[in-house]
Amino acid sequence: MTSPKAGRARQAERNNVTILAAAREVFLADQRAPISAVAERAGVGISALYRRYAGKEDLLRTLCHDGLRIFIGEAEEAAADPDDWAAFERFMQGVVEADVHSLTVHLAGTFTPTEEMRADAARANELAIALFERAHPQMRAEAVPADVTMLLEMCAAVRIPDQARTAQLRRRYLAVLLDGLRAGGALPEPAPTIAEINWRWSTPKPETE
Amino acid sequence: MTSPKAGRARQAERNNVTILAAAREVFLADQRAPISAVAERAGVGISALYRRYAGKEDLLRTLCHDGLRIFIGEAEEAAADPDDWAAFERFMQGVVEADVHSLTVHLAGTFTPTEEMRADAARANELAIALFERAHPQMRAEAVPADVTMLLEMCAAVRIPDQARTAQLRRRYLAVLLDGLRAGGALPEPAPTIAEINWRWSTPKPETE
DNA sequence: GCGGAACGGAACGAAGTATTCCGCTCCGCT
DNA sequence: AGCGGAGCGGAATACTTCGTTCCGTTCCGC
């Protein structure tokens, strides 16, 4: 080979990321989207997809796993901040910004997870909890780590057709939520339990999409 | 007839509400649910459904319109409260409690609305804005009426398999959101516009489900 | 008893969709 | 120069899923 990559091989490699990006966009918009929509979005044929992934489930799993890795990355990066609350805030902003929550949570249950994924999920959880605990003293006392998941879920629900604007609006409402987290006063109703949060990962295909 | 209603006729009338309730539950859990799921949930045959509704769209429309009426009812009821903030809070709690938001917003676009529905939607909007304006002085200044819709959307996103528990959790996070609404400090990013909020009603079938 | 309202549920037909397959292109190496 | 095959596009296949229709049955009300 002359250059590191050239011609066909280069194109193929570029497709790797093109397809993944397309899949990300498509499945972010609709988890039940047909696989053909991904190919269309990527501007490739269906073959290019099946050459890389064994099937839809495989693609979904890869996508989700990537999301998990991004989540971990954001958490680690944010954890470096010495200011406890700033670290937590930065973490939340990072996760919301990357729209990772939809990737991980909303796709869960559409495939059977790898053992490695379970491990990564556990690690992601630990990191998030650590970040939470550090910031906890500055929150209302009843807040628990499981709340973080729900907060992220709520941010992910903010969604309009314009993607860039969606990101803006999410930042806006994340700010509202975080301010709410720091407010005083008692919170009604008991906090969510771990089991209540993780139900998506356990069931094969929960009814409530 | 001996009693106001008896036997078959009574059963039929009871089915009216049974079916609607079933439809409510089923489509609340999954807007794309098959119509047969509704019949199953209601414990009736498909015929019982088609006897009452011209088709799926008709059922969806009815369901949505009912939601709209409930929304209006909650707003009117809450508006009677002389305390401005209490009225607003009560309104939000009522809407969240009734899970009306999913009924109206998430079902929009799956059918072509009636003229009457448009009118009701307009009225619902007015009422909500009035409630908001009354409470506005006690919120952070940048809050706008369109924020209310988004807040409700976020509450609707809180969802776990256990229905009763879901209601509890929604109350919890609504409290967080409302506290966040009253917090001080500037909010990042411009507020949503009316158009950004109402996109679901205008497009025939938006891509981002 | 009879007529028909109200049903249950099988049957039908139209979509939609995951996956396979076949033929074509064009790079990379000899 | 040419060949082997990686990479690919997209039609064809084989199902599955649903909305809707239809027909036979039940049983109330007169």
Image (tube, coloured by chain):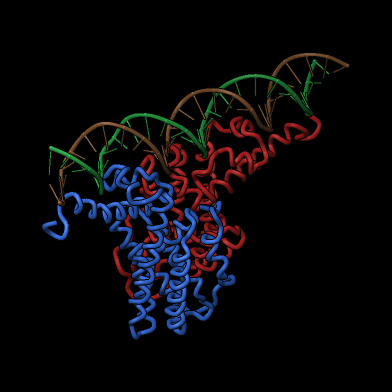
Chain colours: A red, B blue, C green, D brown
Extreme residue toward the left, this view: B2
Which quadrant of the view contains residue B78? bottom left
**Residue D4 against residue D8 in the figure, above or below:** above
Is residue A49 shown to the viewer in this render?
Answer: yes
Q: Position of residue A135 (x, y in %)?
A: 44, 66
Q: Seen in the image, is A4 located left or right of residue A85?
A: right
* Whether residue A179 can be seen here: no
Q: Residue at x 45, y 38 (%)?
A: A111
Which residue occupies 59% across, 70% down? Answer: B189
Looking at the image, which is closer to me, A135 or A110?
Answer: A110
Residue closer to the observer: A28 or B131? B131
Displayed quadrant of residue B10: bottom left
Q: Position of residue B82 (x, y in %)?
A: 34, 86
The foreground one among B45 and B200 is B45
Q: Please give the name of the residue rendered at 54% of the width and 49% of the height, measured from the top-left corner.
A: A28
**Residue B98 image offset from top left, x and y in percent:** 33, 64
User: Which corner quadrant holds the N terminus of chain A?
Assistant: top right
Q: How many marks?
A: 0
| Left or right: C21, with B48 as reference point | right
Instruction: Tell me: residue B111, above or below residue D4.
Output: below
- Whole-percent x and y of residue B20? 31, 55
Who's the residue at 69% across and 34% down the image? A12
